Image (cartoon, helix red, strand yellow):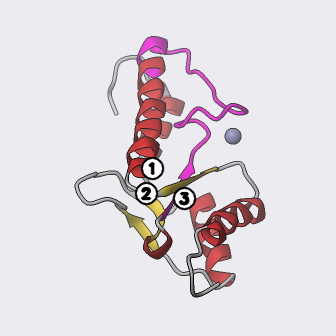
Amino acid sequence: MSRPGTDARTSARLSRQRTRDTAPEVALRRELHHRGRRFFVDRAPLRGLRRRADLVFPGRHVAVYVDGCFWHSCPLHATHPKNNAQWWADKLAANVARDRDTDTRLADNGWHVVRVWEHESVLTAADRVEAVLDSQTGSGDG
Ligand SMILES: [Zn+2]
């Protein structure tokens, strides 16, 4: 990473941004799997919308995103790098705007989006996902 003004810490953040299989993501997958839930991992819920969700439950039209506190500006832990402050402010604001746009597009197509913060306990997060899944149970099973 050689953007002007990025220090070692922000460079580390940049290099982490696109990593899959983050610890909170893996923990949530493991917990939901343990509870008997089955899902796809890192898959785009909608054809033609190139935005992958971390967990996808196609039968119930539920998409789950595990959002990093830094990258998605968690209200509790958002931080604002001082170097290149405007560049970061723009970048993080764009991330949040894209998140909301993704939510809207999915909702418009009949999907339910569950967003989990990386700081949430895995049990709480799994409970929230299950609550949405169960609220989507149609006639028949469940
Ligand atoms: Zn947080």
Q: Which residues are magenta?
A: 62-88
Within 10 angstroms of label 1, few (less than 14), some, or many (20 or more) residues? some
Q: Nearer the viewer, residue 10 or 88?
A: 88
Identified at 61% across, 80% down, the residue is: 33
- Dividing the image into four equal quarters, which quarter contains ligand 1? top right
Residue behind mark 2 = 110
Which amino acid type is shown beneath numbered disc 2?
A: Gly
Residue behind mark 3 = 22
Identified at 70% across, 65% down, the residue is: 131
In the rendered image, which quarter is residue 97 located in? Answer: top left
Residue 35 rendering spot, x and y as whole percentages: 69, 82
Per the image, label 3 sits on a secondary structure element best described as loop
Within 10 angstroms of label 2, few (less than 14), some, or many (20 or more) residues? few
Above or below residue 27? Residue 75 is above
Residue 14 rendering spot, x and y as whole percentages: 43, 38
Above or below residue 65? Residue 42 is below
Above or below residue 46? Residue 33 is below
